[in-house]
Amino acid sequence: MVETQDKSEDTATRDRLIEEIAARLGVRAERGRRFAELTSLRVGGEIDWVVVPETEEQAAAVAGALAEAGVAWRVLGAGSNVLADDEQHAYVVLTMREVKGEARFDGDRVSVSAGYSLPRLCVDAARRGLSGIEGLNGIPGTVGGALWMNAGAFGQEIGTVVESVRVARGGRVVEVPGSEITWDYRHTSFQDGELLLGATLLLPRDERILEHGRPADVLGAVAGVPLSAGDLYVTLTGCAPGIAGPQGNARGPDWRVLESDGTELYLRRDGASQPWRLAAVIRRPPNGTPWQAEYRDHQSGLPRTLRLTSLDAPGSSAFDLTLRLSQVETNVALEAPVFSVEVPRSASPITLDELRNARPGVRED
Ligand SMILES: Cc1cc2nc3c(=O)[nH]c(=O)nc-3n(C[C@H](O)[C@H](O)[C@H](O)COP(=O)(O)OP(=O)(O)OC[C@H]3O[C@@H](n4cnc5c(N)ncnc54)[C@H](O)[C@@H]3O)c2cc1C
């Protein structure tokens, strides 16, 4: 945290100054908040004032005005790396959480404000095929917090992709080139008292290719669901090849269970006059994680919600994925270009482990 010296004469004068600054700059200033509400650890005592700017310019102006008035302040991001004590905190907390706006992408560059969520930025970038921060998507917190300490994971650090950082100086937004900042291991050359407002990152376009990956391994690495091509087909289409015996075992008048080769199909109907529908599939592959698929929210005979869950899988290989299907078209003719892949000549190889570590489609909450 950064702090300036509180030189205001007494608390009443200081409070008046804070109210006057907040009103003049049009920012919210709140009393009675506790660190326990603002940090991940959910501990910490009462804070005299919490000031909530919403733009980079406002944040810079507030920091400048507080410093000029001699009011002590500290900056807070998402509070994921802060342990505050239970005492009264007699200063202003300038929270950057609302200084988030939208991440603005332009080619390989993205300009983003300090309060923007780092995991969200990683997802935004991955969706645009940009790389360089995919390994950071499990780091909780804001972009500002990550810049402050050069956050990193899986061999990547935010500092390596920073083109410039916007910093509050003298009440204004000042752009500092990334090359002028020292980016050390979980530490930077930013000084106490500096407020980081946002940054422009240069993210290389992802041109890497995995050769000869087995479909189940690729799907497992990308989405966390290690289904073989055949199992994926069974699951998404709701068609189970190789299952014979339409009668199956009756479980009451409206349920049938069909079993074959490690697969159980659960069929259901809403009364004798209604058609049978696939309600669930349980699959126990000989060399893989057993899993089940549940089909719900049928419309015109087609399920709109599909939930895939692992059965009895240990921690890291467990999965629980819900897919919602919309605009489903069946029996669409696929043209030849669907099956051809153009690999750019500049593409370099990526290994399955690298892909797994980047976890582009996996969320762990
Ligand atoms: C479960 C968990 C996993 C984590 N994993 C990782 C990991 O893999 N790698 C890693 O590097 N870190 C990790 N962290 C630490 C933490 O997520 C990072 O430090 C993150 O960057 C903090 O961001 P924040 O917005 O929450 O900052 P805060 O916790 O709010 O603040 C942290 C520090 O940064 C300063 N700060 C925040 N925003 C600004 C700003 N705009 N201007 C100036 N100073 C600012 C604050 O004053 C404070 O000193 C993890 C934390 C948790 C709880």
Image (cartoon, rainbow, N blue to C red):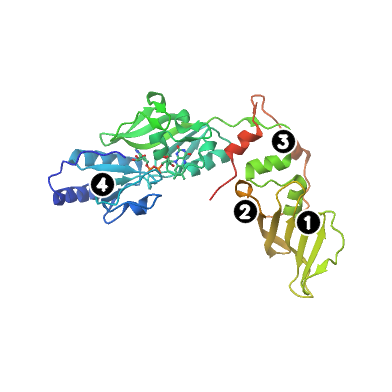
Q: CA distance from mark 4 to mark 1?
A: 61 Å
Residue at the spot 78% in from the left edge and 52% down from the top edge = 331
Q: Position of residue 92 (x, y in %)?
A: 25, 47
- In the image, residue 261 sits, relative to residue 347, either above or below, namely below
Seen in the image, is 297 located left or right of residue 253? left
Mark 4 residue element:
strand
Residue type at mark 2: give it.
Answer: Asp
Mark 1 residue element:
strand
Q: Position of residue 187 (x, y in %)?
A: 39, 31
Residue type at mark 3: give it.
Answer: Gly
Q: CA distance from mark 3 to mark 4?
A: 54 Å
Seen in the image, is 87 located left or right of residue 271? left
Assess disc 4: are there few (<14), some (14-19) or many (≥20) residues with their C-alpha within 10 Å of its C-alpha: many
Residue corresponding to mark 4: 92
Assess disc 1: are there few (<14), some (14-19) or many (≥20) residues with their C-alpha within 10 Å of its C-alpha: some
Residue 213 badge: 3
Residue corresponding to mark 1: 263
Q: CA distance from mark 3 to mark 1?
A: 25 Å
Residue corresponding to mark 2: 320
Seen in the image, is 217 located left or right of residue 177? right
